[in-house]
Image (tube, rainbow, N blue to C red):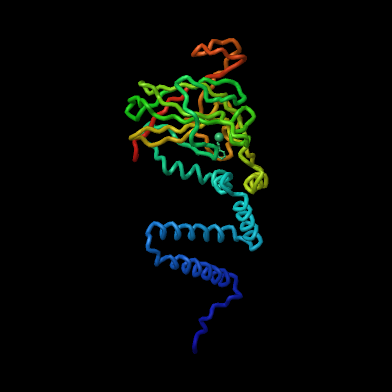
């Protein structure tokens, strides 16, 4: 007597096994489609992308309606992106992908200062100020004295390091968001012979990332705030050292645990001492009203670390 080996697809287990077999077979075919890719790194990236993408689709059992909504979301993201607005980077930021890429590529190295997101508001060609100068350029806000040193991981000072700094004003806006060509809240300076630096800025305040596009809609849909914790951006570069892009954050800021781009690192949270009106300033500058001060000692990793 011959045995019928055709699986009974009406049995629940057999149906599930057949479904799984079809999904696996498709995945295998897509993976094999990259076999002829001459660039081994591109092959690795594409195969891993497809593996993880298919795992996601299969894990959540994505409906065709949800797939279409995702396509529409990405289409809107593309449509609002131009030379001045990069909605894809904002998407990467709010999904933690930017911060994860930065973390991978700025490997922990002894006591080197941690890196964080670059953000969209850096502008090349910001003015140079001398040590003790003011980056404010008329930006509204409470004056803030910032000082520190730049050293290497052996503790040696790094004189002549370039320190770029930029920040939003007290109204939560960067100069470039006013659309009137002003330059305010940004400058660069060079460390002195002892690796020392100091400048006046404005006390950082919280502000929202641009949230009038699809990324803002995504944040609203999932009940997340578009706010960033108060911060001051730094980019520090010197020959022979890994360029550091980072911020400092204000200890006690209510948004430290809810920064919408996941940029906060505990090591970057600094005390900002608030000083009453009339308190003498470090450089004798006359300040109307309250002011604040903070310190940030920076350690650069060697290039290639
Ligand atoms: C910023 O800090 O400037 C920023 C970072 C990521 C997204 C939007 C803004
Ligand atoms: Fe910022």
Question: x, y (%) of residue 174?
Answer: 59, 33
User: Which of the pair 22/174 is nearer the observer?
Assistant: 174
Which quarter of the rendered picture does the C terminus lie within?
top left
* Ligand 1 placement by image quarter: top right
Position of residue 26 relative to residue 131, above or below, is below
Q: Position of residue 185 (x, y in %)?
A: 55, 28
Q: In which image quadrant can residue 138 be found?
A: top right
The residue positioned farthest toward the bottom in the image shown: 1
Q: Would residue 73 be visible to someone looking at this image? A: yes
What residue lies at 47% left-to-right and 27% top-to-bottom? Answer: 128
Q: Identify the residue at image location x=58%, y=33%.
A: 229
Image quadrant where residue 115 sits: top left
Left or right: 276, with 26 as reference point: right
Q: Position of residue 158 (x, y in %)?
A: 35, 27
Considering depth in this image, is 137 or 270 the residue closer to the camera? 137
Q: Please report the residue visible at 34 percent of the width from the left and 34 percent of the height from the top.
A: 239
Q: Position of residue 289 (x, y in %)?
A: 62, 14
Q: Is residue 35 above or below residue 279?
A: below
Q: Compare residues 18 and 147 and report the one nearer the observer.
A: 147
Residue at x 64%, y 59% (from the top left corner):
66
198 above or below 173?
above
């Amino acid at each position: 007597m011959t045995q019928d080996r055709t699986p009974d697809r009406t049995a629940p287990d057999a149906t599930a096994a057949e479904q799984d077999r079809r999904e696996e077979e498709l995945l295998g075919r897509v993976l094999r489609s990259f076999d002829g890719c001459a660039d081994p790194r591109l092959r690795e990236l594409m195969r891993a992308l497809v593996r993880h993408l298919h795992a996601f689709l299969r894990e959540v059992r994505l409906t065709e309606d949800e797939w279409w909504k995702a396509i529409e979301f990405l289409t809107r993201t593309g449509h609002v992106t131009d030379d001045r607005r990069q909605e894809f980077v904002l998407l990467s930021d709010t999904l933690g992908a930017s911060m994860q890429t930065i973390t991978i590529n700025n490997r922990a190295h002894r006591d080197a200062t941690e890196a964080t997101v670059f953000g969209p508001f850096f502008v090349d060609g910001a003015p140079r100020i001398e040590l003790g100068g003011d980056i404010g350029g008329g930006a509204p806000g409470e004056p803030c004295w910032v000082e520190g040193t730049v050293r290497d991981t052996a503790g040696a000072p790094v004189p002549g390091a370039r320190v770029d700094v930029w920040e939003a004003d007290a109204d939560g806006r960067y100069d470039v968001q006013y659309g009137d060509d002003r330059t305010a809240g940004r400058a660069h300076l060079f460390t002195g012979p002892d690796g020392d630096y100091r400048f006046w800025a404005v006390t950082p305040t919280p502000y929202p990332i641009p949230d009038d596009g699809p990324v803002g809609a995504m944040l609203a849909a999932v009940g997340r705030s578009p706010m960033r914790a108060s911060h001051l951006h730094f980019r520090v570069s010197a020959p022979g050292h890994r360029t550091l892009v980072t911020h400092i954050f204000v200890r006690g800021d209510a948004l430290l645990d809810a920064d919408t781009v996941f940029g906060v690192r505990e090591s970057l949270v600094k005390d900002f001492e608030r000083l009453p009106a009339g308190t003498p300033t470090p450089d004798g500058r006359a300040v109307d009203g309250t002011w604040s001060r903070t310190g940030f000692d920076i350690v650069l990793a060697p290039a290639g670390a």
